[in-house]
Image (cartoon, rainbow, N blue to C red):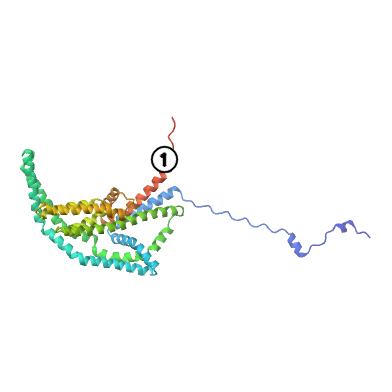
Amino acid sequence: MIAPRSQQTAEPPLRPREALSAVEPPAAPAAPPPPPRLQATRAQRIGLLVGLLVAAWLALQLFASILLPFVAAAGIAYILDPPARELTRLGLPRFLAAMLLVLALIAGGLLFALLLYPVIVSQFGLLLGRVPQYIYLLQNWAQQLITDLQERFGSQVVDDKLRDLVSGQAAAMLSFLATALPRLIGGGFALFNVLTLMVVTPVVAFYLLRDWPNVVARADSWLPRRYAALIRAQAREVDRILAAWVRGQALCCLILALIYALALTMVGLDLGLIVGMTAGLLSFIPYVGTIVGGVTAIGLAFAQFPDWEGVARVAAVMLIGNLIEGYIIYPRLLGDRVELPDVWVIFALFAGGAAFGFLGVMLAVPIAATIGVLCRFWLRRYLASPLYLDPPQRP
């Protein structure tokens, strides 16, 4: 018997699992739209930069009188960071390496004070005791000069009033220097508060040296992400130039101070130690140390030696020292690594001193190095930009 057509075409019933699989799954909920990307505007970037500069300027204006120990401690920590890293690589803990280096620095300063301080004080006493003699010699030299000019050009051009005026002013200048020197030394000590420097600076230097890697890492984490790589590259360039200048100049000043002091003392100049040390230590200012030391040494030689032989010896010492400085010491210790022109360094030191005193002198070279690196960076950007490469319009 044949079954009906409806029974022949009917499909067998679905099993429970197949029935569940035949049902379409519900649609997944739509994903939320991504949050809008935050992007700083140009005005915000400029405002942040201007705000940082204004805050730094106000901090210097308000706290310049108390910042000197902290700036000196930061400079010490910066200079001692490379040897601290070397000691850390050898297995010493960072705090122990920092303590050893700071204690070594204090011991060196105490040794310098114990050995040279009495000699320096005696030299200052000798200088102050000879001021009347120098005044008398300067008066005689000025009067003799005016007399020679009168004989050469006549009394109508150079009269006696001019001779008395020149000799009197020369004596007044030396008297002022003689009375101002002790006041300057006492005022400088009161101004810079040597006791505070001696107590606070080593303590702050130890903590900064101990935490220097953490300080650098924290400052690096605050950099804006968009310009972080660019700022790091410029900071490395500033560090390279500044480290070469600071460490190279420190070695140059010490070597020159030793050379000038020993050589001037050996040729018989009574104040050779203090004059030589001053000339060497001032050589970090280009040309100033050589000029000040040369003029002072030759002037004292004229006052001390009765003949030209002693003056010639002193002049030869200053000349040979200048040649050694220019052709041996500076090329070997500094060379071309320091991209700080002499005129720029002189301007920065005098500008910093005029603005913030001794604190400004300490901050002058780091700021000058930073400005120099930024100027060279922007100059490279300008030379590669359409503003410079855009050809002139054809007529």
Mark 1, other Cα within 10 Å: few <14 / some 14–19 / many ≥20: few
Residue at point 15%, 52% (across, down):
312
Residue at point 42%, 55% (across, down):
232
- Residue 339 appears at what percent x and percent y? 34, 50
Report whether residue 331 is seen: yes
Q: Is residue 298 left or right of residue 340?
A: left
Q: Indicate the amino acid at tag 1.
A: Tyr
Quarter assignment of residue 262: bottom left
Instruction: Find disc 1 in the rendering and name its residue.
Output: 388
Quarter assignment of residue 129: bottom left
- Residue 250 appears at what percent x and percent y? 28, 58
Name the one closer to the observer, 74 or 129: 129
Where is the N terminus found, in terms of image quarters? Answer: bottom right
- Residue 321 appears at what percent x and percent y? 22, 54
List the single residue furthest toward the right. 1
Report whether residue 176 is seen: no
Where is the C terminus found, in terms of image quarters? Answer: top left
- Residue 175 appears at what percent x and percent y? 11, 54
Q: Is residue 254 left or right of residue 89?
A: left
Count the marks.
1
Residue at point 76%, 65% (across, down):
16
Secondary element at image label 1: helix
Residue at point 7%, 49% (across, down):
140
Name the one closer to the observer, 33 or 349: 349
